[in-house]
Amino acid sequence: GGSGGSGGSGGGRRYVTAGRDGLVKVWYPNLTIHRTIDVGQNRGRWLTACCWMSRSRFLAVASTNFRIYFYESSFSSTPVAYIEHKDGTPSCLGYREGAEQEGKREILMVGDHKGCVTVYFLDDNWWSVGTAEGKPDTKADTETGPITFDKEKRRRPIRHQYHDGWVTKVGFVDDLQAMVTSGLDGEINLCNVHFNKRKEGQPAIKLHKKYGVHAWCWCKSYKFFASGGLDRQIIIWNPYTQMAMNYLQGHNAPIIDIQVNEAQHQLISMSVDKVVKVWDIQHYRCIQTFTDKTEYKPEDRLTCMMFDKELPGLVMCSNTLNVLPMSVKVETNRTHSAAIIGALYNDVFFQIVSGDSQGTIRVWDVRSGHMEFEFRKAHGEQKMTCMSFDEQKRRLYTGAEDGEVRLWNFSSGQHLRTYTMKQPSEITGLLWAQTALTSPEGPNTFVTGLAWDRRIYVWPGSAKSTSGTAIEPKYILEDSRGTGHTDDITCICNIPTVGGMLATGGDDGCIVLWKIQDTTASPIVCKLSHTGGSLPKAEHRSVGYAVVGGAAADPLAKGMPLTARRPGTKPPRAPPTAPRCVSSGEDQGAASEAVASAGAPPVSGAVVAAGGGAA
């Protein structure tokens, strides 16, 4: 059988079911029967589906006698009208309420056992079959006459075959403006309901391969479909790319129905062995499993279910109804409602500052674990991409996708300064830097931002902006000679022992050293790349600098030669006993030994690359 929507006189909520016994039953929310309609009239007619038509407030019921019956919201025993559907046995119904610009038109979609879907266009007063004012003649036969479709009064229905077998479900998704069909051939189709054909450039979706699809649902919040069937798994897929996003596995029997609980971010699935699973759609994992232990007669099985968001509760159907309350809230350990783009530890205040892509910044006390302060929309509607402290760790820099950098007092949420660029490019890395040159006021400090355009933007750190004025970059470091990175630059770090020295890593597997300067010469100092054959090339995702054995042994600070070569020069020949790798650590007080690679004296400082790359 099938379960319908809620309706009824006086605005009361009702559950409506249709079954193999040819009866439509209307239930109160407390699961007592309000009314029973004998659609089959004791002639052995099965009812295969029903749906509630919200605009006209009619109940549509599909029968195996090739008819679609329509009943008023009062649920009287006599149908208002019916449609002769002689081309195939109706197996499922779908409904779409017409948009405002379409007038009062309603669309009824009927899937049948031949794999076809028929679309009926129902205009204003469509239920009128020739009686006065469109009202049924109650003195006539127990069944009102059929609805006729002709060119003068009503648009002819459109029939199209989509599947090689039964159509298991048909419906309309408003967000996509698409009719969606599924069948026992394992295919799912996204169709234009007005022309009843597949959307242009969108072939049949065959993620379930040859296994039949019994159910699907659309998740409005996350913009994906969930479908399941004979292959015993739920496939989460993107309607725009038609590619699978995830697979939810755990059922031991074919899945017959899937529902979505948008408020609690859950999917609910039911299989033929009466097992119901609740899935967390944020983390794609099963959070609850239960089995219906009720013994139903004459068949001990569940047929369908419906999620009632007003209870909220899950209504499960067999030869009777069961309601499972869904009032239990699933606890979550999430600290942000969006993707976290950074978390920084502040050893001055013993705090952790975290930020997400929506611009929410939260300050946490590491000793108690409690959140002390938060502020939101750090960059308005722009996506926040990275964060960094200043040297004293008393201020916070944040970068955004529009190329804007902002300075904050993260203890109060006060916006202090704004740094911009003329041609916006997404900021992917931020840090504080200092040059060796000093001015009468003290050392020159800078805010450096790494952008997707492979440039490093350098803003003066000591500059103060007047009200409403943004600070422009003082230097823009770029590879004008083509001797640096050959792919996207993904990470950046500061070398504190050498003023104005920066290191970047990229998708090309190389590390490049840069010098903050205002001369016309190339800002690239040298390029570190692996030239041997023992280590594979890999992408760098982070880069850092460490000194082992104390700052006095730092080769960069003392002007020692590097293991890398300058762009355009040949690598030196290595002596037979020279090792091929560099090790480093963070214990600056230990007298650790580090050996440089070919052609250089032993050093105790090295650039450390993380993420699989070789330096």
Image: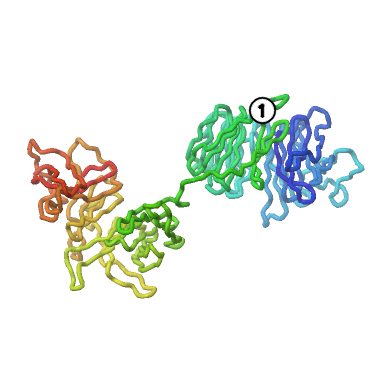
Residue 446 falls left or right of residue 235: left
Is residue 453 visible to the viewer in this orientation of the structure? no
Determine whether 43 is above or below 580 in the image. above
User: Foreground: 219 or 374?
Assistant: 374
Q: Image quadrant for the N terminus?
A: top right
User: Foreground: 376 or 272?
Assistant: 376
Residue 313 point in image, percent of width and height: 64, 42
Residue 506 falls left or right of residue 361: left
Q: Residue at x 52, y 41 (%)?
A: 280
Residue 360 point in image, percent of width and height: 44, 57
User: Foreground: 295 or 178?
Assistant: 295
Residue situated furthest right in the rendering: 139
Residue 426 point in image, percent of width and height: 36, 57
Total residue callouts: 1
Q: Which residue is mark 1?
A: 301
Query: How many other residues sit within 10 Å of disc 1, few (<14), some (14-19) or many (≥20)?
Result: some
Looking at the rendering, which quadrant does residue 301 occupy? top right
User: Foreground: 191 or 463?
Assistant: 463
Residue at disc 1, secondary structure: loop
Residue 280 falls left or right of residue 259: left
Is residue 174 visible to the viewer in this orientation of the structure? yes
**Amino acid type of the residue tagged 1 in the rendering:** Arg
